[in-house]
Amino acid sequence: MTQSTIPDVAAVRQYLLDLQQRICTRLSEIDGQATFATDAWDRPEGGGGISRVIAEGAVFEKGGVNFSHVMGDTMPPSATAHRPHLAGAPWQAMGVSLVIHPNNPYVPTSHANVRVFVATPENGDPVYWFGGGYDLTPYYGFDEDCVHWHQVARQACEPFGDQVYSDYKRWCDEYFFLKHRNEPRGIGGLFFDDHNSGDFGRDFALMQAVGDSYLEAYAPIVERRKDLPFGDRERDFQLYRRGRYVEFNLVYDRGTLFGLQSGGRTESILMSLPPLVRWDYSRVAEPGTEEARLTDYFLTGRDWLELNDE
């Protein structure tokens, strides 16, 4: 089999639509009450997508699983910052992006995204790059959940090289970091971007491995924690910590910035935001509490697989 640098856009599109459907089906099964509503949309500048949203369920307070395939005549600024030679080139971007916000504070919020970007410079062949990953944002942490999340991530990366997991894990820790708070958003996972090895088939397979492993990583955690009892204290802390999620998405997230700069659909771009959130002035958790343990122990960029090997 010969390597190809030419992107098979049709194959990627079919995979992403199937991934969206599989994720929505499985999460609806876990919720048992609510299902994902479907909202197909067109983008006047070119392309469109399908937004799938679940709300007010037995398990999930709000969740969105969005497929988009958009295109344009000129690369947006966020995409040309590191690729000035592609300025002015026609482009298309395609991906599935999701965020799931649970009702129960003992169930973590999860985020996942897999995507491809293709630009066609004048008098040149199409240039592609893949990106994606997933990360977990607990409110009350459990070692077992963190280890499982990272075990699945490592297994997904293993066929592509010994260093892939460790590199993408470190990249995730660095990317999902709130500089103004000096703390990680969650316990990490995988993150990669601008990936092009010159072998489209292998690069596409890497994106598929990441996308396919998301449910394996997240579903068992949800099922373990969704029925744990909680009260007003835990709910209040969950809403407060959701503020960190909002801050990251609006200040740092490259996907959000790209979507807004490229004239994307606002409802789909901002569907990742939780329905309820709160900010408190100079709030500090009482030492020795589970709330303090979140930042003192879980949100420290630790190596969870090393913990498992001890």
Image (cartoon, rainbow, N blue to C red):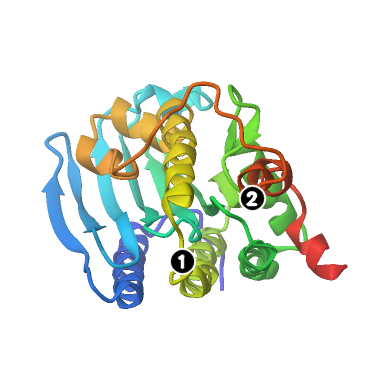
Give residue 96's mark: none
Q: Nearer the viewer, residue 63 or 162?
A: 63
Q: State the residue in front, 104 or 193.
A: 104
- Tell me: 40 left or right of 195: left
Question: From what the image shows, is residue 86 above or below residue 231?
Answer: above
Q: Disc 2 marks which amino acid?
A: Glu
- The outermost residue toward the right is 310
Location of residue 91 (image quadrant): top left
* Residue visible at 62% across and 45% down in the picture: 172
Count residues near mark 1 (Cα–Cα under 10 Å), then give few for <14, some for 14-19, many for 20+: few
Q: Position of residue 24 (x, y in %)?
A: 30, 68
Which secondary structure, mark 1? loop
Residue 290 numbered tag:
2
Spatial CA span between label 2 and label 1 = 15 Å
Residue occupying the point 61% across, 45% down: 291
Quadrant housing residue 163: bottom right
Picture layout, residue 32 above or below residue 256: below
For the C terminus, the image quarter is: bottom right
Q: Is residue 124 above or below residue 186?
A: above
Image coordinates for residue 17, horizontal then vertical, percent: 29, 65
Q: Residues within 10 Å of mark 2 (few under 14, many from 20)?
A: some
Residue wearing tag 1: 229
N-term mark: 2 or 1? 1
Percent position (x, y) of residue 120? 37, 38
Q: Is residue 300 left or right of residue 57?
A: right
CB atoms of marks 2 and 1 within 8 Å: no
Q: Which amino acid type is shown beneath numbered disc 1?
A: Pro
Q: Secondary structure at mark 2?
A: helix
Q: State the residue at coordinates (46%, 55%).
A: 105
> Quadrant of residue 67 in the image?
bottom left
